Image (cartoon, rainbow, N blue to C red):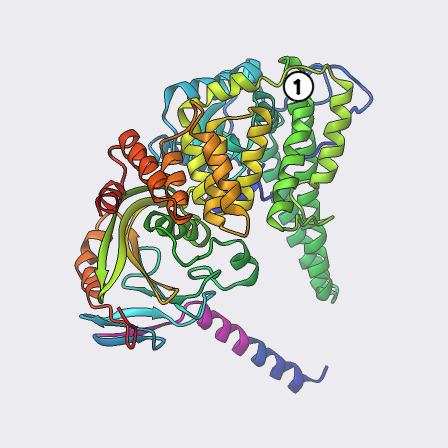
Amino acid sequence: MANPLRRFLRVLALVGFALAAAACQHYAAIGPGTYDVHGKMAVQLDSQWNRQVAGPRAPWAEIWTRHGPFLDALVIAAGVAAGKPLVDARSTTAEQMPKFSPGMAPGDLVTLVQGTLGFAEKASDFETLRVETARIDGHEAVRFEFTFGTGAQRGFETDRKALGVAVEVEGQLYLVLFHAVDTHYFDALRPTVEAVIASIRFPAKRA
Amino acid sequence: MSLTRRGLLGGLCMCGAGGLLACTPTDPGSPRLATGIGGQSDLSPRNQPGQRHGTDSDPDAGMRETMDRMERRIQTSRYRVREAKVNAYVGGIVQRMAGEFATDIRTYIVRVPDFNATQAPNGMMQVWTGLLVRCTNEAQMAAVLGHEIGHYTRAHSREGHAVRRTNADIGQALAMLLGAVGAGQLADINTILLTASSFGYNREGEREADEIGIRMLAEHGLSPIEAARNWENITAEFEARGLPREHSLLFSTHPSDAERTTTLRRRAGELPPGEKQAARYRDGISEIREYIFEEQIRTGVHAATLVIADRWLAEFPGDGLALYAKGEALRLRAKAGDDEAAATALDGAIRDAHAPANAWRSYGLLRRKLGQEAEARDLLNEYLRRAPNAPDRDLLRRSLAG
């Protein structure tokens, strides 16, 4: 192989590697202000979050974090259709993941969220603390809290806590789920997350 | 030599959904029962009872230290099952089967809903709750425990680590040599062959451990055929989920499920039949049986839950907990015909003494969905009476008051 061609291929390989590495860990800052989730839902942010802009997730899902997803993660699923998983769109995984069905009972929505975390985060040992009704932008919603653990299979476990709301609007599911390490991060970010939840609006959706 | 924890974990036995058993016995023609623990056969131990590896200048010192640190962590872990009866039951079986190694192996039951057990070279054995829910009798569980003990007595982790270390040294030396003679491009082939050799060592270790496990079943009066059934059950579960069980001839850490099933079935035919001890198993894990079924249901893998529930029902017809698991999985899956099948299962569940309170909740929600509100109210009220502190109590009370 001629030297210039070899040099070109090496440069191309390096550029490809750099692009792939960047795509793996790509976050963009969002907020403060109004944030529009795929035109299906809007929230008000009182401060800045880091939005994951690449990764294996469904087109209706968003993942935000303040300190990195290992410490805290805010998951938004805006308009999950019947028969679809909440967040992950990789074909082999998605086929195995629990899926949303319209008309699910509130407790079943919590089971759906926990099953999804089991797949996506290898989470286990769930303990549901609370399942209640709530109102989100005039719609009846379910609000929940639970604890769980991650990392048992890998030998570095963390105790995590989650809170979230789920609401079914016109046969589609809207979910805001916050989960974080149970020491410091969950409690520290809770007021900010509560403000995000309280600000949820569904443009052009009838209550 | 320093070792990462992940690297070490990769070297542990992974007897689970990610790769299970299979055994080509070293002496396939012999029906003798000696596990080798007494030093009577070709599977005699490489470890000695009471021996502690990895002290001072020993090359295994890093491995030992890392495993000890992991064990200290698991002792205080949220995942550790602490219920006394089930620990005494599972740990007691390990102690009896391990014989003179009894005090060297420490058993921890860990809350992870996958089919797996691991044996670390420092004596720490982990048994995952996903294994316990998938076994329906003592012989099936003991086959896996015996397999893990086999890994310990034959020092597979420690020896495997040494093989990988030696292969890495050979690989480096060959790569330098190939580079020096202008054949550096061949270094990749060299690496592939040495890596395949390491995997080959792993597979041979799994075959040895399978053989030790099945011999232990026979020695303790347990049914050896149940060792093969473990693999048939895993195959059935993967088929029900529509998942392929991939197996690479060179790069699999375990023999294929088919090979393990065939070998273990053949070996079982050469050994005394033994007992399954199903009732003893159900009683031994009774403290956590409801938890492990709920844990399985929450994975959301309904196809797996249905296979597991049916397996329990084949062993214990009418078992309320298994009927509940079946009914709940069908109700949550909600495919055509599932509601009717769920109703049948849940109706049977609430008539059995082993039914959990959640069976009434599940049945109540199903009746409500089917428009049978009066029946639904009775069932949900009964659920609240049986589970007054349920996390959804306020929500349900409000719906019942409305």
Q: Is residue B71 visible?
A: yes
Answer left or right for B236 relative to B57. right
What span is colored magenta in the figure? A14-31
Q: Image quarter for residue A192?
A: bottom left
Q: Is residue B63 visible?
A: no
- Which residue position holds label 1? B223
Task: Please state which of residues B375 and A185 is positioned toward the viewer in this rendering.
Answer: B375
Q: Image quarter for residue A138?
A: bottom left
Q: Secondary structure at mark 1?
A: loop
Residue B7's x, y, as percent? 52, 46
The tally of labels here is: 1
Residue B102's x, y, as percent? 51, 16
Answer left or right for A207 relative to A101. left
Asked if B104 appears above or below B299 in the picture, the reply is: above
Asked if B29 appears above or below B61 in the picture, the reply is: above
Examine the structure image and report whether residue A25 is included in the region drawn in magenta: yes
Q: Image quarter for residue A92?
A: bottom right
In the orientation shown, which residue stands out farthest toward the bottom? Answer: A4
Q: Residue at horizontal 69%, vertical 34%?
A: B22
Examine the structure image and report whether residue A5 is included in the region drawn in magenta: no
Query: Disc 1: which chain?
Result: B
Circle 1 packing at 10 Å, graded few (<14), some (14-19), many (20+), is many
Q: What amino acid is at disc 1? A: Ser
Q: Residue at horizontal 28%, vertical 56%?
A: A164
Q: Residue at horizontal 68%, vertical 19%?
A: B215
Task: Please state which of residues A25 and A37 is positioned toward the viewer in this rendering.
Answer: A37
Q: Residue at horizontal 72%, vertical 60%?
A: B178
